[in-house]
Image (tube, rainbow, N blue to C red):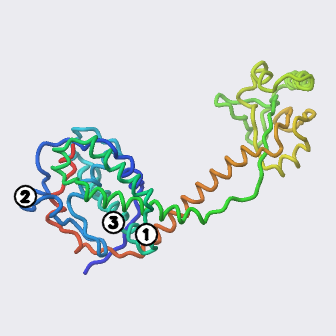
Amino acid sequence: MKQRKVTAVVLAFTMCLAMLLTGCGSGDSNTSAQSAAGKKAPSEVLVLRVGDDEIYLNEVNYYALSMIKGMGVPEGTDMSQHYSADYPTMDDAFKAQLLAQIRQSKILYLKAVEEGITLTAEEEEEMNGLIDEFIVSSDQEQLDKFGLDKEVLTKIYTQVGLIRKLELQIADQIKADDVGYGTAENLVFLRVELDENGNAIVNEDGSYSYLSEEEQEQQRQLAEEALERLKNGEEPEDLIQEYGLEETSGTIHGTTDSMREAYGLADGEISEIIENDYSYTIVKMTKLEDTEYTETIHSYQMQTAAQEAIEEQENAWFNEFSISEDDLEQDVWEAFTFQDFL
């Protein structure tokens, strides 16, 4: 028996499933896969197995509709058009993607069951509401055609719910760091020349291309004037606009420790002119310990770390789970086409 590992796919399939709350796609004939199976109802046509889980045509139909919806495929798209050397037609490419997504979703569902994850009564109530919304917003003839009744929808939505809880379980293990961040405003009066894209021009030896001494002196005088106006209570954003510094100046952030070390300013304090190879810069400290910005950064960091952890764990599960091509009903799968949904 030929075995292979499941490979990861790019599309976030569970998200597509959750987003599909409107009507089914169009198509006037019975699916080719159903026709090839002898006019059986979609719920009676076995398409593939993943472990001990059997996936029938009605479930595959829902996954296909979700994929079309999630990818925004226009109605009437010709799925027979050329795609690539690996996948001669768009239909071939979409089917390969669909098969990988179904297998991955099933593996995650089986892992969730193995972990003992279940839905609460409140979660089941919410799920039933989504199912009812899907049914009400769909054409009944289309639902019948693709075999999308309450039973199969409950099965699919339950699986999606368990997968989400499995991913949240992984994400809950991620902890935020304890680094704080600060916020300041800076006014930057350049000493160097810029190119048309706003980048500092660098000479062949790696040095900056400086403004003339006269121009640099003018910039220093403007910086001194701006510093005095800041100390007299004028707002940084007003001065930035007046002096035309929008491309180089504005709000800056950094860790609390790095900003304390770099500027030595308390909240509301203004630096003297900081001269460096690049500019004459003035800094006004807004909040050395900016709780709101720190929470935003921590939230982003946790989301990124959680997503990476989820992908790493899921890919490990996919690689451990061997898939047999013998588990695929070849005649039904070969007859299946996305054209039936467009």
Q: Residue furthest top?
A: 242
> What percent of the width, then of the height, locates residue 3?
31, 77
Q: Do the residues under discs 3 and 2 have CB atoms within 8 angstroms? A: no
Using the rendered view, name the quadrant where residue 21 is placed.
top left
Kindly indicate whether the residue at mark 3 contacts the one at mark 1 (C-beta within 8 angstroms). no
The answer to whether one can see residue 47 in this image is: yes
Numbered badge on residue 103: 3
Spot occupied by residue 102 in the image (x, y as percentages of width and height): 32, 62
Q: Is residue 308 above or below residue 248?
A: below
Frontmost residue, 44 versus 236: 44
Q: Which mark is residue 155?
A: none
Alpha carbon separation for disc pair 3 and 2: 26 Å
Closer to us: 223 or 174: 174
Residue ID for mark 2: 39
Q: Residues within 10 Å of mark 2 (few under 14, many from 20)?
A: some
Task: Tell me the number on the disc at residue 112.
Answer: 1
- Which is closer to the viewer, label 3 or label 2? 2
Viewer-nearest of labels 2 and 1?
1
Identify which residue, 40 or 216, lies in the foreground.
40
User: In terms of image quadrants, where is residue 59?
Assistant: bottom left
At 31% from the left and 42% from the top, the residue drawn is 22
Q: Quadrant of residue 2?
A: bottom left
